Amino acid sequence: MSENNNQQVFDISIDVVPKNNGSKCFDDDGRLKRTGSVWTASAHIITAVIGSGVLSLAWAIAQLGWIAGPSVMFLFSFVSYYTSCLLSDCYRSGDPLTGKRNYTYIDAVRSILGGARVKACGLIQYLNLFGIAIGYTIAASVSMMSIKRSNCFHESGGKKPCHMSSNPYMILFGVTEVLLSQIPDFDQIWWLSIVAAVMSFTYSSIGLALGIVKVATTGTFRGSLTGISIGTVTETQKMWRSFQALGDIAFAYSYSVILIEIQDTIKAPPSEAKTMKKATVLSIAVTTTFYMLCGCMGYAAFGDFAPGNLLTGFGFYNPFWLLDIANAAIVVHLVGAYQVFCQPIFAFVEKWAAQRWPESKLITKEFQVPVPGLPSFKLNLFRLVWRTKFVMLTTIISMLLPFFNDVVGLLGALGFWPLTVYFPVEMYIAQKQIPKWSTRWICLQMLSIACLVISLVAAAGSIAGVMLDLKVYRPFKTSY
């Protein structure tokens, strides 16, 4: 592919109709009036943040111990909050109230940094979102299987092992996402985010409650100050697992990648950045509290043997129906979260195609499909074909690599530094014109370098975990 074509892939400009200043129906960029608030933005963030990552936190704290585990979690929450505030100031280029809007993360990178970093950002961002879609497909299938196995176990009185393949459940999840992916854009899935946020609180609360009950039953807080003991694992395994735990915690806070897209749904005044910062502090505070409670109570309940997926660690204990509710809530939440994370990929490809082939009826023509009792649905053939193929690809890869814990750690490690730290820091420096070698510039660069080191060791630990899984793995033959 030529350099010009390479540039074209990531250099998507957005056509803006003439401004309608003072209009009640349109914003300053000519688009329909945005209606988002602190609450809807918080719902989007909570949907993105409290995902399947919460389920692996007890395992992560078990590797690090009572001192390092909670400390690392607080560190990641602070870094995510701080860099999200930096990023929210980059929604508008130039003036924070009247400057040109950046509709997506990559638009912000293009208008503020430009050059080769635009292509690097686009590649990293969309690969990360693609990976998250795979991780969520795996997690949803695990929860669906847990419900089926739990019922099988109790119906047989514990006499059957109830082993089953994850493939049918991944396919079922994929079919659901194919249907929901036909929703045209981010602004129209606010209701899905609110439902998903409620579900995330439901299963997190059940996991927390079961952890508390288990601790109360045994009468002891398990675990140690330094984490899983040598003997349970070897020294080498402890090192790699500790590194992987960093990736698991990083994944639990991976939402900066869609922050600009969420901010683009917010109404003004007040300024979008001001509202977004309020939503960020509210949602990070809520999610960190939940993370600390779920992770710490899970570790206290299981100690060194904390499972990679907290809810599966409770096995088939009674009340099994409560675990079924929790797992069902996970599935509903991940159905919504999948859409929140995939909408930026969908929008990018569709805008690129529309600019590449503006005369194509396949890409631009929309058909009105009547829906009984509801407004007619706009069906676009390109959107139907492309989004269906995307969901099919994520489903097939999930069936090939169904390693929940290792995939989560690897995604967290690969996406944390570039998307959560490096690009927000560099854009903020350029936007605010911070002098090179000033105290503030040095502090921001030190933060970036420290997070790069953390990401590298976390990636190494997760890759080691995947390699161990592959030694005993047979494609499409995974059962639980």
Image (spheres, rainbow, N blue to C red):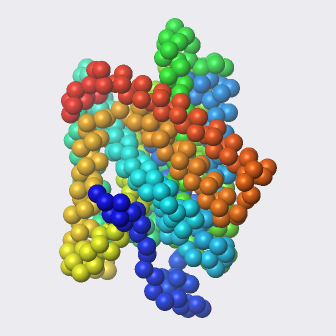
Position in image of residue 423 (x %, y %): 57, 54
Q: Residue at 45% of width from left, 53% of height from top? A: 120
Q: Residue at 67% of width from left, 46% of height from top? A: 445
Q: Would you place residue 135 above or below residue 189 in this image?
A: above
Q: Residue furthest right?
A: 439
Position in image of residue 265 (x %, y %): 52, 71
Q: Nearer the viewer, residue 42 or 209?
A: 42
Res 313 → quadrant: top left
From the viewer's perspective, is 216 left or right of 125?
right
Q: Nearer the viewer, residue 59 or 453?
A: 453
Q: Residue furthest top?
A: 231
From the viewer's perspective, is 59 left or right of 69?
left
Q: Residue at 58% of width from left, 90% of height from top? A: 21
Query: Considering the image in quadrants, where does the N terminus appear?
Result: bottom left
Position in image of residue 439 (x %, y %): 79, 49
Position in image of residue 77 (x %, y %): 63, 44
Q: Is residue 314 visible?
A: no
Query: Considering the image in quadrants, where does the C terminus appear?
Result: top left
Q: Residue at 41% of width from left, 25% of height from top? A: 465
How many labels sit on residues? Answer: 0
Res 321 → quadrant: top left
Q: Nearer the viewer, residue 422 or 270?
A: 422
Q: Is residue 424 visible?
A: yes
From the viewer's perspective, is 333 left or right of 297?
left
